[in-house]
Amino acid sequence: MKKFGAFLSLLLAAAVGLFALTQTPRAAQNGAVQTDFTLRQQQQIEALVRQYILQHPEIIPEAITELQRREAVKILDSYRQDIETPFPGTVAGNPEGDVTIVEFFDFRCPYCRQAAMDVQRLIDEDAGIRVIYRDFPVLDRGGEPLSRRAALAALAAARQGKYVDFYKRLFDLPGRLSQELLVAAVRGAGLDERQAVRDMDSAELAAEVDKNLQLGRNLGLSGTPSYIIGDQIISGAVGYDALKAAVARARDRSRVAAR
């Protein structure tokens, strides 16, 4: 209901703007032009809006989607620099690509395993894509903090220039995330194990994980995987086709904005 109310306000504002074009403007302070509406005129506008909605209810989902997009743009613009500034070594694809996919994921998330394949397919097929991986360990629920430990191990791999290799190897290993799988991924990626252990205990990597968690909360992300593509926030393992379409939309909007 809250979103629907915001939609009505948006539509009403548009109607007021259109109605104002038919009014006789008056000069205002500072050279601005204003138009006064009587109570009767406001009631007429509201009646027109209500009548239009009843006659064209199909516009409601479209308008709500547009409202959600505008709200997402405001949030994303507030955190754009943090979102698109990667931790060194956590980038895949074309570093100079024209479309950036930022993926928030958890190694403990089974859906992120499929999502990893979808994103890799996009990288393989589209030379203009840059991917930023953000470790987002939200699935630890008591017990052993494997999600956070895996995130720290991945960032330790980034310090050795082997983040993507570690990422792929850990998701390729069968079974649920465990300490044994972590060790296997570290060794399979060819990491210096002693250095990796030291880095996993560092304040810098802990701060990076905490930063990702806070950034996700600020963006309203509730689970994994989640993606930021242009001005779109996409939640869930939506699949290759949906991601490809989101990339196309981001690219089109970027081209229009550049004109």
Image: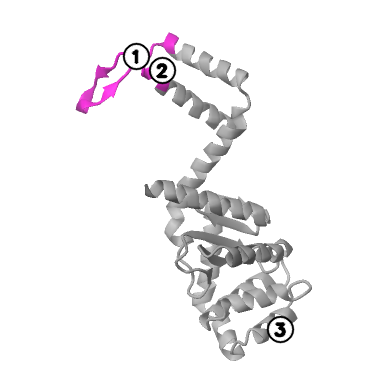
Compared with 10, 150 (above or below) is: below
Image quadrant in which the N terminus is located = top right
Q: Which mark is residue 23?
A: 1
In front: label 3 or label 2:
2
Residue at 61%, 22% in the rendered image: 56
Q: CA distance from mark 1 to mark 3?
A: 73 Å
**Coordinates of residue 146 in the picture (x, y in percent):** 69, 73
The disc labelled 1 sits on which kind of residue? Gln
Tell me which residue sits at (63%, 67%) in the image.
Answer: 120
Q: Which x, y percent locates residue 210?
A: 54, 66
Furthest residue in direction left, as rendered: 30
Label 3: element kind: helix
Give whichever of discs 1 and 3 has the lower sequence position.
1
Report x, y in % for residue 35: 32, 18
Q: Which mark is residue 184?
A: 3
Vertical placement of residue 172 versus 128, above or below: below
Q: Is residue 144 left or right of residue 119?
A: right
Assign a secondary structure to mark 1: loop
